[in-house]
Image (cartoon, grey):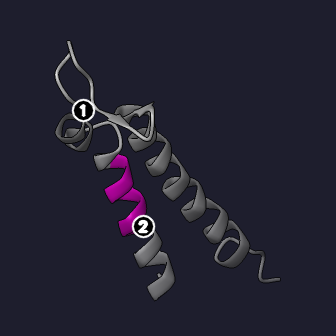
Amino acid sequence: MSKLGRTLTIIFLLALLLGPGPGSMLIDGSAGEPAIWFGIPALYIWALFWFVVMSTCVVTAALTLWKNHE
């Protein structure tokens, strides 16, 4: 596996862990008063950010690592 492949794998797994996992509990307020960032619920922004990170990893791998070398 190349250095780029290992880096993308680590970033993807980190995003997979932090997106819906313990990271979401750290940024969200209480159930009665959720945290709001820029007028949007923080949990929504948090999940959207990690989705973009994972999508970027997949697109980067598709364009650079997953090519047919015939």
Q: Main secondary structure of the magenta part?
A: helix
Q: Which residue is mark 1?
A: 28
Q: Amino acid at mark 1?
A: Asp
Image check: 64 left or right of 9? right
Image check: 64 left or right of 53? right
Q: Quadrant of residue 37?
A: top left
Q: Viewer-proximal residue, 18 or 37?
A: 37
Spot the residue most to the front.
39
Q: Amino acid at mark 2?
A: Thr
Q: Quadrant of residue 60?
A: bottom right
Image quadrant where one finds the C terminus: bottom right
- Taking 10 as reference, is 1 above or below it? below
Magenta span includes 51: no
Image depth: mark 1 or mark 2 in front: 1
Q: Which residue is mark 2?
A: 9
The segment highlighted magenta reads 9-16
